[in-house]
Image: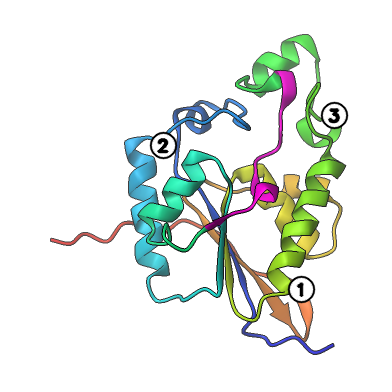
Amino acid sequence: MSVPTSKKIWLVRHGETEWSLSGQHTGTTDIPMTEKGNRQAMATGQWLAAHKFALVLTSPRTRARETASIAGYGNVAQIDMNLQEWEYGVYEGRKTVDIRKERPGWFIWKDGPLEGETIDQVAARADAVIKRATEIDGQVAFFAHGHILRIIGARWIGLPGNNGQKLGLDTGSVSVLGYEHSLPVIREWNTVPHLISKH
């Protein structure tokens, strides 16, 4: 099947929060963005201003929905539960360095969180939201979180979900998935827009 080269999925990671800044695992905890996070969302909005999306999807978490709203898509963004961040179980709110004091050598991409989702479960959610996007005629935007978006990136190019570990993603970043000769490719990754002064 031939796929139009103009078909793209835009991945937007939410702006900075206190926990993303400190390195605490943030899954289901609903915490607001920092002032810097709000500025990042504004910069994203400026950067995306020329883009019209056939569908905008967001995680249900406040930090993702607020990023979509500040960026100018709050009135069209639809919540998709598959864009929730990895559920970290008992590791919610904890830092990797502290977890490794109890489990030396622990690595989330290999070992997963205790009482949380497995990497395969998160990858299945990624596959589901990718399928929804590919069934839309036009460009699509996802507003979500670091780990789920990295897994979406890996799954898009046909790799197992744990390959998301190789796709670093900063807060407030924008990435673009697309096609080349009908094959899914990563067109752009981890671009961090900068706020354009109005003065």
Magenta stretch, residue numbers: 78-90
Residue at (77%, 31%) from the top-left corner?
A: 108
Q: Which residue is mark 2?
A: 33
Q: Nearer the viewer, residue 192 or 156?
A: 156
Q: Is residue 21 left or right of residue 123?
A: left
Give the mark toward the camera: 2 or 3: 2
Report the disc number at residue 111.
Answer: 3
Q: What is the tally of numbered marks visible in this picture? A: 3
Residue 153 image-quadrant placement: bottom right
Q: Is residue 178 magenta?
A: no
Q: For the N terminus, give its image quadrant.
A: bottom right
Residue at (73%, 82%) from the top-left corner?
A: 180
Residue at (72%, 55%) from the top-left corner?
A: 152
List x then y, in percent, for residue 74. 42, 57
Relative to 139, residue 130 above or below: above
Residue 44 image-quadrant placement: bottom left
Mark 3 crowdedness (10 Å alpha carbons): few <14, some 14-19, many ≥20 = few
The amino acid type of the residue labelled 1 equals Pro
What is the secondary structure assignment of the residue under circle 1? strand
What is the secondary structure assignment of the residue under circle 2? loop
Q: CA distance from mark 2 to mark 3?
A: 29 Å
Q: For the C terminus, give its image quadrant.
A: bottom left
The amino acid type of the residue labelled 2 equals Met
Mark 2 crowdedness (10 Å alpha carbons): few <14, some 14-19, many ≥20 = many
Q: CA distance from mark 2 to mark 1?
A: 32 Å
Q: Which residue is mark 1?
A: 184
